């Protein structure tokens, strides 16, 4: 009985070791490089697009930027309801990110993203608007971050009830 436990443990270890090594390589995998216009980012399956953009902005002390991208995602869009001042969400899984665009500014000493996109499904139907969340699906997402030399802030504007890029913040 004791030898069966050791045999099971050995089999489990042999089966899970490659998976653990792959996950370890994935977490240490480089996600971006610096290029003349800013940064080129390549994210892989399971990566949180917003978290990686915010981390890049903090780590590289990006004053402000715009970005574009494409790839495969699971996405949550939101349509801004002017009455409630909230986003009405809708999720789309396993879709192709045909277009991603947005800006990076700062609010309360943290990166503030404003992101829009268009996704398509397997029937070539397109859906788009304000992105609330995006996680890389099967494949990857490529993002070009174009850095600006001026720091920009986002501020809450009333009566709109939304964060707006403030060009006066310099």
Image (tube, rainbow, N blue to C red):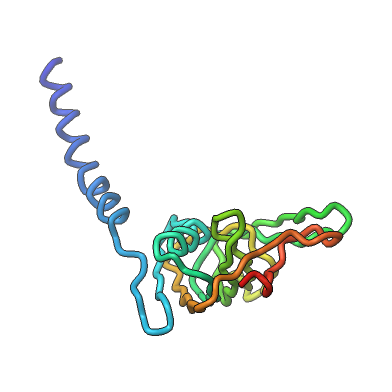
Question: How many marks on residues?
Answer: 0
Residue in front for this viewpoint, 104 or 84: 104
Q: Residue furthest front?
A: 170
- Name which residue lies at 85% across and 52% down: 84
**Percent x, y of residue 139:** 42, 66
Task: Give residue 85's quadrant in the image.
Answer: bottom right
Task: Give residue 32's quadrant in the image.
Answer: bottom left
Q: Is residue 141 above or below residue 29?
A: below
Task: Give residue 103's quadrant in the image.
Answer: bottom right
* Res. 128 visible in picture: no
Query: In which quadrant is the N terminus drawn?
Result: top left
**Percent x, y of residue 16:** 24, 41
**Percent x, y of residue 123:** 63, 73
Query: In which quadrant is the C terminus drawn?
Result: bottom right
Residue in front for this viewpoint, 120 or 169: 169
Q: Residue furthest right?
A: 83
- Name which residue lies at 53% across and 59% down: 50
- Name which residue lies at 45% across and 60% down: 58
Q: Left or right? Give the position of 4 relative to 31.
A: left
Q: Residue furthest top?
A: 1
Q: Residue furthest bottom?
A: 36
Q: Is residue 76 above or below residue 127?
A: above
**Percent x, y of residue 169:** 64, 69
* Res. 22 visible in picture: yes
- Name which residue lies at 68% across and 69% down: 165
Q: Left or right? Give the position of 160 relative to 28.
A: right
């Amino acid at each position: 009985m004791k030898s069966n436990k050791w045999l099971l443990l050995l089999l489990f270890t042999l089966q899970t070791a490659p998976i653990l090594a792959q996950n370890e390589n994935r977490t240490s995998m480089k996600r971006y490089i610096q290029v003349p216009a800013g940064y080129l980012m390549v994210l892989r399956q399971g990566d949180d697009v917003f978290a990686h953009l915010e981390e890049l902005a903090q780590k590289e002390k990006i004053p402000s930027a715009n970005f574009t991208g494409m790839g495969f995602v699971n996405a949550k869009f939101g349509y801004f309801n002017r009455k409630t001042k909230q986003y009405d969400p809708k999720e789309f899984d396993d879709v192709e990110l045909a277009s991603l665009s947005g800006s990076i500014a700062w609010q309360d000493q943290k990166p503030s993203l404003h992101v829009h996109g268009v996704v398509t499904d397997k029937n070539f139907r397109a859906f788009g608007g304000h992105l609330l969340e995006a996680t890389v699906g099967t494949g990857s997402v490529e993002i070009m971050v174009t850095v600006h030399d001026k720091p920009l802030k986002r501020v809450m504007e009333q009566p709109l009830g939304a964060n707006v890029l403030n060009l006066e913040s310099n």
